[in-house]
């Protein structure tokens, strides 16, 4: 869980459960953190898609959406979650390393930092033109990928900016309002809104 106010990592849920339950858990976390924006990874396995579907089925609405168009005349298709392809992963891992090396955001969870730094490009398997970017031997990448998905959501949504506060109206406005429209529209004054 990351903060859109300052970009810092503020909480972590770590465990292994089936995708449908994970979707429900994400909804609980989102509600706990004030209807937080959730940016789950959906590819390359069907587990992410199942978790996103379960998240959506709970009625949770503040979910990252990907819009795909196969060609210019096709109707855009909206899907929940970040489709993690090779180019997306390379861009996000590069961004994550810069954040760690330059200390741009606070990441208080040691394992996330270690995973971000442990990405390597594996040699291509037979029939592939390029290798895969993944965690080095002995490391996992689930925590770092979750953090990278948060960064993608932050890039997409931007930092949260509080709405401007409007002070009370000056006394002369209140007096003018009461003289011009003693009952206001429908019995309510425009100054009382």
Image (cartoon, grey):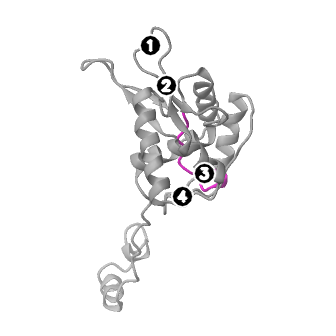
Dominant secondary structure (helix, strand or loop) of the stretch shown in magenta:
loop
| Mark 1 and mark 3: Cα distance apart in space | 35 Å
Of the pair 141 and 150, the residue shown nearer to us: 141
Position of 162 relative to 68 (above/below): below
The residue at the far left in this view is 72
Q: Position of residue 53 (x, y in %)?
A: 60, 28
State the residue at coordinates (42%, 63%): 161
| Mark 2 and mark 4: Cα distance apart in space | 30 Å
Do tag 3 and tag 4 residues touch (Cβ < 8 Å)? yes
In the rendered image, which residue does mark 2 sit on?
132
Do tag 1 and tag 2 residues touch (Cβ < 8 Å)? yes
Q: Going by the image, does 24 lie left or right of 148?
A: right
Position of 188 relative to 52 (above/below): below
In front: label 1 or label 4: 1
Do tag 2 and tag 4 residues touch (Cβ < 8 Å)? no
Tag 1: Cα neighbours inside 10 Å, few (<14), some, or many (≥20)?
few
Tag 3: Cα neighbours inside 10 Å, few (<14), some, or many (≥20)?
many
Q: Quadrant of the C terminus?
A: bottom left
In the rendered image, which residue does mark 3 sit on?
1
In the rendered image, which residue does mark 4 sit on?
3
């Amino acid at each position: 869980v990351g903060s859109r106010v300052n970009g810092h990592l503020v909480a972590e849920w770590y465990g292994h459960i089936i995708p449908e339950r994970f979707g429900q858990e994400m909804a609980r976390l989102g509600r706990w953190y004030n209807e937080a924006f959730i940016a789950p990874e959906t590819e390359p396995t069907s587990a992410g898609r199942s978790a996103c579907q379960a998240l959506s089925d709970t009625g949770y609405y503040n979910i990252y959406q990907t819009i795909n168009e196969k060609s210019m005349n096709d109707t855009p298709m909206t899907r929940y979650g970040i489709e993690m392809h090779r180019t997306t992963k390379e861009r996000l891992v590069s961004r994550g390393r810069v954040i760690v090396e330059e200390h741009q955001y606070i990441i208080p969870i040691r394992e996330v930092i270690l995973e971000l730094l442990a990405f390597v490009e594996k040699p291509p398997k037979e029939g592939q033109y390029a290798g895969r970017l993944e965690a080095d031997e002995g490391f996992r990448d689930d925590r770092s990928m979750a953090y990278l998905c948060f960064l993608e959501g932050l890039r997409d949504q931007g930092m949260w900016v509080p709405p401007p506060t409007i002070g009370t109206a000056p006394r002369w406005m209140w007096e003018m309002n009461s003289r011009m429209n003693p009952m206001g529209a429908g019995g309510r004054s425009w100054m009382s809104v």
